[in-house]
Amino acid sequence: MVRVPVLKNIMGANDTIAKELKEFFSNKGVKVINVLGTPGAGKTSFIEWNIKQLGDKNRIGVVEGDVASQVDADRLGKLGIPVVQINTGGSCHLNALMVREALKLIDITNLDILFIENVGNLICPANFSLGETLRIVILSVPEGDDKPKKYPVVFHTVDGVILNKIDVLEAFDYSVSAFQKEVEKINPNAVFFPVSCKSGEGLIDWIKWLKENYFIS
Amino acid sequence: MEMHELGLTEELLNIALSEAQKVGAERIVEIKLKIGEFVNFDIECCRFYYNELSKGTIGEGAKIVGEYLPLVIICNSCNYRGGIEDFGFVCKNCGGKDLKVLQGEEFFIDNIEVIKKQNGV
């Protein structure tokens, strides 16, 4: 028997396409926001809110990733923006190849911002770059404040953490400061925004930060 | 639900088969992976998929071995090089937060063990 050195990156195929996408987005001047999060945390509501706030000065598109259905695409399509739905057919995350395929259905040259709503999951999407400019993760109060401890990798890979549904804080035994402390421990560079996509609380701060740091008008 | 291990197992099988072919192997006996501590990858799940995916290939029956690589960082403030505690990205030496990950995010096939074809057979 012979041992043969291989030393080949298993994520290589995804990373290569992601790198191409990053260059492509950069050349077209499109800011791409990869939105990760748990199912039901409010990813679609958050994107909806962003479209309403930024849509007057920016051309926005969305790539929606779900295991099945057109529910989210139909919802966002009502805002009059281009939306492409990817059904992953059972897969737990979006990969760069899926995004590249989806881009064939959207005119990226006419966009300033592209949101990519990933499949609701805190594990798999963490390791798959989509060539994004900015990666955020959204969680919500009813899920509990212990998630950073349980899913450290995803928190380490993001630029920002959004805690949604702070309007229901009183109904839950949830410590925002404990959550924030855990996030800071795993990722001291990530920005943190507690928000409510229902009342709008905190969202202005997020938009302000986004505009200032990513040159969005 | 189809977990991401399926796609990654397909990927690693393809790499192993192609490398085995290059050296004229008739069978792959073992595939050795190196998996960073910060990569979400379940090796048991991979083995399960591998057994199905490799059927009928020269990789069928190969043992999948994984070595986990712990997180190692370097502190840009004091040059401390080493591990961190409990996923806290804080330098154990000076408490600095400007750290660079040196190890723990990689995921690759280190080597494969193969049986080569006998000449003339």
Image: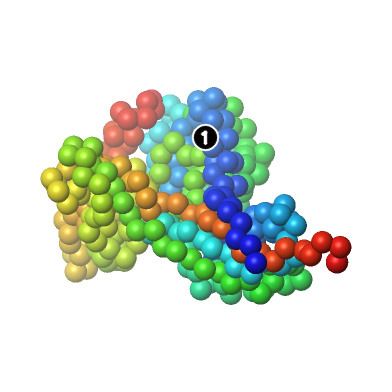
Residue A51, located in which quarter of the rendered image? Answer: top left
Residue extending farthest front: B119
Query: On the image, numbered disc 1 is attached to which residue?
Result: A22
User: Which quadrant holds the C terminus of chain A?
Assistant: top left
Q: x, y percentage for residue B119?
A: 82, 61
Is there any visible trace of residue A156 in the rendered image?
Answer: yes
Question: Is the residue B50 above or below the residue B78 in the image?
Answer: below
Q: Position of residue B69 (x, y in %)?
A: 39, 58
| Nearer to me, A63 or B68 | B68
**Three-letter code, disc 1:** Lys
Instruction: Give the residue displayed 65% in from the left and 67% down from the top.
Output: A1
Q: Is residue B106 above or below residue B13?
A: above
Horizontal side of A75 relative to B39 (left or right) equals right
Chain letter of disc 1? A
Q: Position of residue B18 (x, y in %)?
A: 70, 54
Q: Residues within 10 Å of mark 1 (few under 14, many from 20)?
A: many
Q: Position of residue A199 (x, y in %)?
A: 28, 50
Q: Quadrant of residue A107?
A: top right
